[in-house]
Image (cartoon, rainbow, N blue to C red):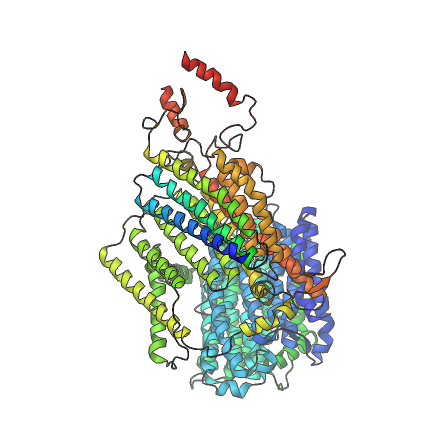
Amino acid sequence: MTAIAEPLIAFFLIVSGIFGFVGSFGLLKLGDPMSRMHAPTKATTLGVGGVLLASILHSVAIEKHLSLHELLITLFLFLTAPITAHFIAKWHIHRHETPQSLPRAGDDVIWATHDTPEQEDGDAA
Amino acid sequence: MSLFLIVALPFLGVVFPALLVRAGRDASASAAGTATLLALIGLLLHAPAVLRGEVITARIDWLPNLGLNANFFLDGLGLLFAGLILGIGLLIILYARYYLSREDPMGQFYAYLLLFQGAMVGIVLSDNILLLLVFWELTSLSSFLLIGYWKHLPEGRQGARMALAVTGSGGLAMIGGMLILGSIAGSYDLTEILRNKEAIQASPLYLPALILILLGCFTKSAQFPFHFWLPHAMAAPTPVSAYLHSATMVKAGLFMMARVWPVLAGTPEWFYIVATTGLATMLIGAVIALFKDDLKALLAFSTVSNLGLITMLLGFGTKMAAIAAVFHIINHAVYKAALFMTAGIVDHEAHTRDIKRLGGLRHLMPLTFTIATIAALSMAGLPTLNGFLSKEMMLAEALDTTWNGSRLVLPAIAGLAAAFTAAYSFRYIAHVFLGPKRHDYPASPHDPGPGLWLAPMFLAVLVVAIGLFSQALVGPLVKAASYAVTGGDLPEFKLKIWHGFNTALFLSFGALLTGLALLRLHGGLERGWNAMPRPEAKTIFDALLRWIAELSRTVTDRLHDGAISRYAMIFVVFTLLLAGYGYFSGTIGLPTRDVQDAPILPIIAWFCLIAATALLTFLHRNRQLALVLIGVVGLTVSMSFNYLSAPDLAMTQISVEVVTIILLLLCLNFLPKGTPVDSSLGIRVRDGVIAGAAGLGTAGLVYALMVRDFAFPTISEYHLANSKTGGGGTNVVNVILVDFRGFDTFGEIIVLGIAALVIFSLTEALLSTRVRAYLLNRKPDWPQSGDAHPLMMVVATRVMMPIALMVATYIFLRGHNLPGGGFIAGLIASIAYVMQYMASGFGWAAERQHFYYHGIIGSGVLIAAITGIGAWFNGVPFLTSDFGYFQIPPLEEFELATAMFFDLGVFLAVVGAVLLALESLSRLAWQPGMVTEHAMDINPARDDPPEAEDPAQTAVKED
């Protein structure tokens, strides 16, 4: 049991390490905010996910008791990470893009974040 | 009746007139009268025993550690004063019922009057000087309310303020004097102090104590040069003046001098300060009174003069003089109350108190004339009336006393004052009642109904009766009171009219004749007096007040100029100075512990902290960036707590962080995005140096602490040892919060609640000003987002809410034994709600919120209080917790502790406070049209599915 588990745990830890590194490196290296946003999402999902899997395996195989707390952490990460990314993207579009610089959202609609009442008035006028 | 009840009755009575005034003015007055009458009866029941020489006591140890005990005692002096206070109080209540007009709020009047009466009775019956001081201040406060009763009159308000300022500051001096006296005697009990005459008079602190106590007495009793407040207090309704200035307020100072007479009197200091002040006051008051045209001003200065007379007698320090003083206190109270009441009747009927506009009233108001004449003649000192007796005793004492080696000074000045007294008394009769009838009174005067004349009539009868049968009527009382004043054996004395032909009698008659002559010459004298330049006390007082206010404003403005950097600098520099003093004057032992190696994690945390604070120093002008950096510090601190095995602290810190950052973000919404540069480079360098010194000092202090063992054993051991056995919990932190230091926590949740209420009332007040219009029309600095409530966020917070609440419940329940507790649970629950506000919008969330947060805070504090009070029923002190182990099959054995209810209170108070703060701040951002119908920006329940719409759109596109 231990013999199979130990390499597996090591594998997951290495995977998480690699993705954690890639995520941090990308955050530092990538050019514009929208691309940069991709990097940390890798770190949170795959990077942290790897550690958590390793932790579950460790508790089951080595410490001989089932621990599922880690699943809760995963759940919370899956809930919060997309929302954080969503808000960062929204903020970027809001502050640094104009309706003209963005791809068309539809025929007679613009991107939601630019769709303020004032601008509607402006359009009507 | 117990002395406690006698003192408490007026206070208990305060409520009833105020409530019963709805049932009519008679009901209100009789309620006030009943309380007073009951107290008076209770007092009189003790009278026979006290007159036999017994002392009645009632004692309760209240705060024995402070020496403050609810001890009362009743001796002759107390009986005399309490009798005057309650007896004349009863007459005043009757008189005021008919004096006050329909527009005056009568319930309020009687409530104030009873409050004042209770405070006065408290003063004269207290055996504990600390308790006495409490009552003393209470008389200052309640007399302020009474004097300013006609709050629509500026004179009333100014007079009340002046009386409060003078008597209140005198009271402060008195506190100092009393504390010195108590510390010399080693006890704050009067009876104990009065036994320590030698120790007190030998003490080097005798003179300071004497001066401070006399300051209190002189201000209260309107002695020169503090006499000026009394005439200005005449703006009060006449019943108030009659009460305050005949029997009570101003007599409190005399009472106090009489009370401490046995220990303080008899020294040259006492004689020269007290007797001279009294003498000067007596003469000045009498002279000014003669030239006052306002009836009440005349009586006010006459009161000042009479108070001076009594003060002088007390100042002589001989036993016979003390007897005369006691006797004159009775006589003055009786005739002066009657005179004030007749002045009030004249004012009430003729609608003026100006002597120049009066005269000839004896034809129109024969009854009032009779009463006023008897009382005024007694004041003048006409034989067979009571005033004559005490005045003659006074003159006899003055003749027997030498002042600075001269036997003439005292009798001469006292005789002169007596002559002026006779003159203004005669003037009160002659210029108001005698003379031809006039036709230009502002109203048509006539005798009033019995409600108004009964009380002064009774007093006038007393004036005659005491004059004729003094020994029989008041002899025993004077004897008992004088015995209490002098605190020892009395010389044989008998109150009688005829003492034979002696110097005092000639002096007395001489004064009467001079008085008549002065009245004759009054017209000419008055012209001279008016032409003479005199200092106006009110102007001086006002200038003094303005000067003090100016001075304090200058000092305050210097220290407190509104710049936080200034306060911080003062605070830090002061702390640095203290610390520097401590460092350079103290010694420190050698280090007893080794410096530990630093593992990598603390170094990283340390680096984060240093980096965040360093960046903050340079980037703080960008407020949002500053907030992020503060967040870094907070998170690092939380992690450090966790690393150092303090999970409770870590959890608390992290939830506090979240709430704080959200609230600060909300505030930043209304503030400029950047902080302007408003101090010069020099100031910033100076501040930097100060901050650096303070930081290095703190670091050094912490280092010094950490490499040494504590000098004394810490309390932690006790907490660790007793947490499970005494508090029933294994989580020591939580047991400390709810049990060991439960009272602290109780105070803290109250403070937390108050803070939230303050935020609420500040924003509420702000919204009722022009700021509201500004906020409504405010253009945000950045363009607002079109979808303020994105679907993803709304859904996620909905999903999270039950989970978060469950976590809060879990944390709450396990708190007693594992990390957690009401405070952390409260924060987590608040965050669960705050998330809804953030995601779905304030308006939408507020519409679904059915409990007022004020109520939640209140219920939290109440639950905690009730839990604490519950301990009393088990005969243990407030907030003692109890716990037990129960087993209900099929559950395992579990523990229930009362601390849980206390923790529930903490929980509710925290939730309420956080959410109230959030709600208050959010209200500032509210603008019309912000409440959306749906939580998110699209209608989640729309019946036209977007899929159905899409083909149509694409169809149009294709076209």
Front residue of B861/B531: it is B861
* Residue at the outermost right position: B889
The C terminus of chain B is located in which quarter?
top left
Q: Is residue B768 left or right of residue B117?
A: left
Q: Image quarter for residue B479?
A: bottom right
Residue B435 point in image, percent of width and height: 54, 55
Q: Is residue B612 left or right of residue A66?
A: left
Q: Is residue B250 above or below residue B826?
A: below
Q: Is residue B384 above or below residue B808?
A: below
Front residue of B353/A9: it is A9
Q: Residue at x 61, y 51 (%)?
A: B809
Q: Residue at x 50, y 51 (%)?
A: A52
Residue A44 point in image, percent of width and height: 44, 46
Front residue of B9/B581: it is B581
Q: Residue at x 57, y 71 (%)?
A: B719
Q: Is residue B462 above or below residue A103?
A: below
> Is any part of residue B492 visible from this angle?
yes
Q: Image quarter for residue B686?
A: bottom left
> Is any part of residue B841 visible from this angle?
no
Residue B492 point in image, percent of width and height: 64, 86
